[in-house]
Image (spheres, rainbow, N blue to C red):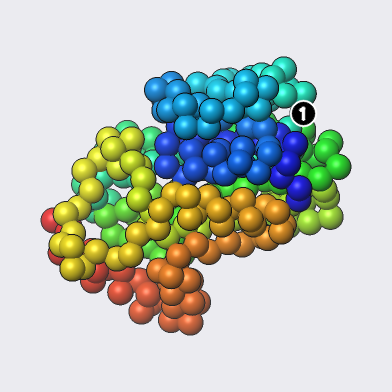
Amino acid sequence: MRIRDRVFVVTGAGSGIGQAVTLDLLSRGARVAAADLREEGLAETVALAAAPPNRLTTHVLDITDRAAVAALPQQVIDGHGQVDGLMCIAGIIQRFVYLDQMTMDEIERIMAVNFWGTLYMDLAFLPLLEKRPEACLVNVASMGALVPVPGQSMYGASKGAVRLLTEALYAELRDSNVAVTLVFPGGTATHIAENSGVEPPRIPADKMPKILTAPEVATAIVEAVQKGTFRVLVGRDTHMLDRLSRLAPQRAISLAAERMKAYLS
């Protein structure tokens, strides 16, 4: 899919991967409707982009608010005249605790943001995407959707739901003009813990895995859209877990459990 002069809606555009994707798209000549819960994050994106107003619009949005999401397509049409691509990147993680230490409010919040928010966005924009000569729909899962990570069980479950949702959309849209892309980023340096209101585990420097940068993940996502790639694995850790989860699923689960045991009570 061509990027230049196309209009993309990006959630989570106020920080991290969403912000990096927004900047990457703009650098390639696209127009972007940037959506995020935090107005200050969107202001930072605008400052970093330094793009003309006709190429970047911002939309303060709670993706768990179904009515607000339903109103967004018309706002984007009003600002840009069309929608060619949707990139659902917004997400949160949970507290690093075992499942039985979580409250139902915490569990419901994780599912609301990561799964329901993605579903609301997909349903809201799909009718517009299907009207375009070519379009894309990108949902971001996680390597936690490949192998369960103790201490992030509900995060993984929510991203697993995103994975199956996206695979189903691919199956249903195979013969349409909408290219569906499913992204599995590895560990990435972002402010997701801070934005989620959680304290990350303290991992010694000598045991810290290699962390991707948000621009690295963004480049992989945008290039996948250009090529029409369905499944995108970003990072060596993600590739390793993907292979291991298919060849030896029980071993993969045990490996993740052993690595996290020291950081959970």
Whether residue 70 sits left or right of residue 14 in the image: it is right
**Camera-side residue of 247 and 216:** 216
Hey, which quadrant is residue 228 in on the image?
bottom right
Residue in the image at 24% along x and 64% along y: 208
Mark 1 sits on what residue? 82
Q: Secondary structure at mark 1?
A: loop
Question: In the image, what residue type sits under mark 1?
Answer: Gln
**Placement of the C terminus among the 4 image quadrants:** bottom left
- Please provide percent x and percent y for residue 226: 70, 54
> Residue 135: in sight, yes or no?
yes
Residue 23 horizontal/vertical position (percent) = 54, 39
The answer to which quarter of the image holds residue 83 is top right
Q: Classify residue 29 as left or right of residue 239.
A: right
Q: Compare residues 241 and 41 and report the one nearer the observer.
A: 41
Residue at image position (38%, 49%) is: 155
What residue is shown at x 61% (from left), y 37% (from top)? 26
| Front one among 10 and 71 | 10
Q: Is residue 100 visible?
A: no
Residue 250 spot, x, y in % from top left: 38, 77
Task: Please indicate whether residue 210 sits to the left or right of residue 3 in the image.
Answer: left
Q: Is residue 240 above or below residue 137?
A: below
